[in-house]
Image (cartoon, rainbow, N blue to C red):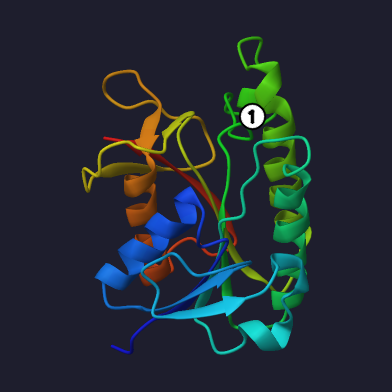
Amino acid sequence: MMTKKIAVVAANGRAGSLIVEEAVRRGFDVTAIVRGENRTAAQNSVIKDALELTTEDLEGFDAVVDAVGGWTPETIPGITDAGIHLADVLVGTDVRLLIVGGAGSLFVNPEHTVTVDMGPDFPDDWKPLSAAAGKVLAHLRETDGLKWTFISPAADFQADGERTGEYILAGEEFTLNSRGESTLSYADYAIAMVDEIESGNHVAQRISVVSK
């Protein structure tokens, strides 16, 4: 089996760096795409803003992971901009695009008409973040000729959580584990992301991950 060659955009971030670490651990050929100095375990790096990446920059990779994040009014729009830009430059190529998504757009009813972020308990402070990721998902669904996968984490997404090596893979609906919790560590999310890169089981789908 050939070594997987992947690029992680925003690799210096909390999610991106752990995805890099997990991929390197498995022997992948990993390139960190960063705006400054590469602070990850990746063997290679490209210093470039996500919005400046071209089709030529990304050709030759098996997969590109979009780990662009944002927490402030100034940075949250970058989530949407980066996701849509990467989708557009990878249309018509064989390069897979995997998006670090959000939980707010997961459905809470079988008809798939109501999402987590529509609920009365969803914090107002989180709504811009959820909307930004939701716009990326909508764009992916409308884009033909793109090998995409959008992976939503649990609602309680813990940056410093334990790496257990176990998780529940779910679909489009908000899912709780056997303890009635929707939690997940960034480290276990990284495992699920790299598992999906290896398997290729969910092309043109949104999936979700919760702790076991």
Number of numbered discs overlaid on the protein picture: 1
Q: Amino acid at mark 1?
A: Glu
Would residue 128 be found to the left or right of residue 99 on screen?
Answer: right
x then y, percent, for residue 36: 60, 67
In the foreground, 47 or 85:
47
Q: Quadrant of residue 23?
A: bottom left
x then y, percent, for residue 86: 70, 68
The residue sitting at 49% across, 69% down in the picture is 38
Q: Is residue 113 above or below residue 91?
A: above
Would residue 141 be found to the left or right of residue 163 on screen?
Answer: right
In the foreground, 80 or 108:
80
Q: Quadrant of the N terminus?
A: bottom left
Residue 122 seen by the camera: yes
Circle 1 residue: 111
Residue 193 seen by the camera: no
Residue lying at the far top of the rendered structure: 120
Q: Is residue 88 above or below residue 205?
A: below
The residue sitting at 58% across, 34% down in the picture is 106
Would residue 97 be found to the left or right of residue 135 on screen?
Answer: left
The residue sitting at 40% across, 26% down in the picture is 182
Would residue 203 be found to the left or right of residue 18 on screen?
Answer: right
In the foreground, 102 or 196:
102
Q: Is residue 68 above or below residue 118?
A: below
Q: Quadrant of residue 4?
A: bottom left
x then y, percent, for residue 187: 33, 48
Q: Is residue 49 above or below residue 150?
A: below
x then y, percent, for residue 210: 37, 36
Q: Secondary structure at mark 1?
A: loop
The residue sitting at 26% across, 23% down in the picture is 178
Q: Quadrant of the C terminus?
A: top left
User: Within 10 angstroms of label 1, few (less than 14), some, or many (20 or more) residues?
Assistant: few
